[in-house]
Amino acid sequence: MSLRRKKTVACPKCNKESDYLFWESLNGDLDPEAKTQLIDGTFFQFKCPHCGHECKVDYGMLYHDMAHQTMIYYVSENSVEEIQKLFSDKDGESGFLIPRYRKRIVTNQNALREKAIIFENELDDRVVELFSVK
């Protein structure tokens, strides 16, 4: 299941407020249009209805890809340790104890998109990272 909610954001250019749809979690199999936007890089895009200014909105979320048995949690740097504990919960109290699932934590939008693309193409992200140029 995907969880999303509307919030009001102020345009950084004209400072006028408008609604923006924030996703707390995105299930790519149940919301294929949003998955496509994540993969093509437009998912976090905001276009002000007042002045037309376009920018990215930065917020954390959980991406779930059931077909490829993957969960990718996009969080801030200071939340990584907390999410690692949730993902490694041996008692299953967190709800993240899912056998055979690949669980990853990323700290920026580009890494989230990259991981989603890698898993969509049925590759091993660990191998891809070994050969990526930083």
Image (cartoon, helix red, strand yellow):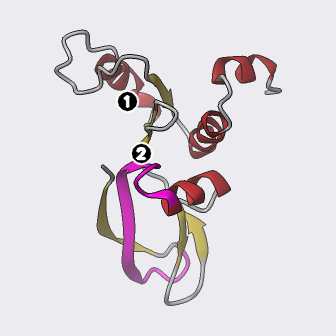
Disc on res. 60: 2
Q: Where is residue 106 in the image (x, y as percent from the top left)?
A: 52, 32
Kind of residue indicated by mark 2: Gly
Left/right of residue 106 with respect to residue 4 in the rendered view: right
Q: Is residue 84 above or below residue 121?
A: above
CB under 8 Å between discs 1 and 2: yes
Please state which of residues 21 and 77 is positioned toward the viewer in this rendering: 21
In the picture of the structure, the residue carrying the numbered disc 1 is 79
Residue 17 in sight in this render: yes
Q: Where is residue 80 in the image (x, y as percent from the top left)?
A: 41, 25
Residue 134: which quarter of the image?
top right
Disc on res. 30: none
From which residue to which does the magenta span run? 13-32
> Magenta segment: does it hold 27?
yes
Q: In the image, what residue occupies the spot 16% across and 20% down? A: 93
Please state which of residues 71 and 56 is positioned toward the viewer in this rendering: 71
Residue 57 in sight in this render: no
Q: Where is residue 92 in the image (x, y as percent from the top left)?
A: 20, 17
Kind of element beneath mark 2: loop
Label 1: how many Cα within 10 Å (few below 14, some 14–19, many 20+): few
Kind of element beneath mark 1: helix
